[in-house]
Image: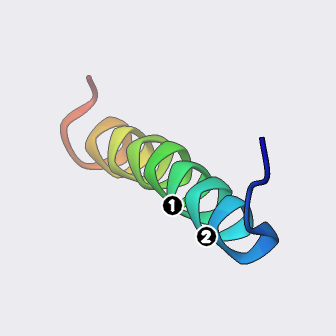
Amino acid sequence: MFVNKFDLIFEYSLLINLIFGKIKLYGLGHLCYGI
């Protein structure tokens, strides 16, 4: 099955952004609210 490299890179970048976004949100919540 042929997968377009650009599609794969795009999906991975979205996944990484999602994960880092959650980490950032959690970090900000921890700093601001002491969660």
Q: Amino acid at mark 1?
A: Leu
Residue under label 1:
14
Give the structural element (helix, strand or loop) at label 2: helix
Q: How many marks?
A: 2
Residue under label 2:
10
Residue found 51% across the figure and 61% down from its top: 14
Considering every residue shown, the one lying at the far bottom of the view is 6
In the picture shown, does residue 4 fall above or below 16?
below
Left or right: 29, with 4 as reference point: left
Residue found 37% across the figure and 45% down from its top: 31
**Mark 1 touches mark 2? (CB < 8 Å):** yes
Give the structural element (helix, strand or loop) at label 1: helix
Residue 11 location, quadrant: bottom right
Q: Nearer the viewer, residue 18 or 28?
A: 18
Residue found 52% across the figure and 43% down from its top: 19
Q: Nearer the viewer, residue 15 or 4?
A: 4
Considering every residue shown, the one lying at the far front of the view is 1
